[in-house]
Each structure stands twice: as structure tokens, then as C-alpha cells.
Image: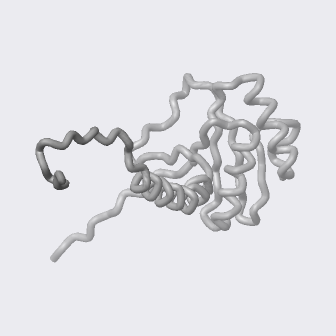
Amino acid sequence: MASQFDPRTKRKPMSDINVVPYIDVMLVLLVIFMITAPLLTTGVEVDLPQASAEPIDKDAAEPLIVTVNKEGDYYLSVGDNPDKPIDDQAMVTLTAAVLKHKPATPVMIRGDGRVEYSKVVYAMTLLQRAGAPSVGLITEAPEPVKKKKSK
């Protein structure tokens, strides 16, 4: 009787792949992606200005500016009366019309420093809904800090 380790016995090579470890890895990855995917899709895509940003070129197209005052009212730089507050649906409609007519129009938001952050973010979501590919934020340059003279 030939033993199991007898060199005279011929064994066929095993051509099956053990897929159980691969299934375990795939299930772990599936759970990880199911948990992280909803976290990645929340938010608004915004091109934030850099600290060393240059002013907008005067030769560029006139930007579409949404202003948010300290009460949270929205104003649009286009339309019949840019000094009159505008509602959400009208802002989306007018912005979409401008971007359809001139797709290269830059879109900017100018928000009061005392307005709630959520009002500015909501304006960004409305502009994104209207088809704006990116939104810039208008800021003022900070005043230079004066050094005190030491005695």
C-alpha cells in the first residue's frame, strides 16, 4: 500500500481557486463604501479663493454677482431691479438664463460678514442648481497690521 507521501504516486495538480478569502475582502470593502459614500456626496462644490489670489481681470466677462445682506436677503446683479431683493426661484431662473446665454460668465457671491453662514451656503446650492460650474467668493483685502514701536 502506497503512503500519502510516496513519490511513486502521481497526484494531479489542483486547478481550483479558493475564492472564500476574496469574498470576505469584497464584503468588507462593500460595507466600507456603503458607509462612506453618503458622507462624500454631501456639500457644495465651491472654488474657494486662495490667500494670494489676484483680482479679477477687467477684460474678463462681467461676473454675475449674488449679494447676501445682513438680514439674509438675496440680490442679483442682473434683472430689472438689482437693488430689490429676489426670491429663490427667481434667482435660479435668472441665473440659468444668463448662463445659458453666456456660459463663460463667472458667478460670484458677496456676503455680509454678519450674515449666517447657512444663508451663503444656501445661495451656493441655488447657483449650483441653476447650472453654475463654480462659484467664487468676493472678499475685501485685509488692512495691513501696523507694528507698534518698541521703546
Residue occupying image coordinates x 62% and y 56% = 42
Quadrant of the image occupied by residue 116: bottom right
> Where in the figure is residue 147, as x and y percent of width and height?
27, 66
Q: As drawn, is 146 to the left or to the right of 134? A: left
Which colour scheme appears in the figure? one colour
In this view, the residue farthest toward the bottom is 151
Residue at 75% x, 48% y is 126
Q: Is residue 98 left or right of residue 103?
A: right
Kindly identify the residue that appears in the image at 56 percent across and 62 percent down. 35
Nearer the observer, 151 or 88: 88
Q: Residue furthest front?
A: 1
Picture layout, residue 91 above or below residue 103: below
Judging depth in this view, the residue of 12 and 35 nearest the camera is 12
> Residue 108 location in percent, x, y?
63, 42
- Please state if 48 lies on the left or on the right of 72 as rendered: left
Where is residue 6 shown, x and y percent of the image? 13, 49
Residue 76 in the image: above or below residue 26: above
Task: Report x, y in % for residue 25.
Answer: 43, 56
Q: Residue at x 65, y 38 (%)?
A: 107
Q: Does residue 104 appear to the left or right of 100 in the view shown?
A: left
Question: How many marks overall?
Answer: 0
Q: Quadrant of residue 104?
A: top right
Residues 94 and 6: in front is: 6
Q: Nearer the viewer, residue 61 or 37?
A: 37
- Quadrant (top left/top right/bottom left/bottom right) for the C terminus: bottom left
Whether residue 39 is situated above or below residue 129 in the rendered picture: below
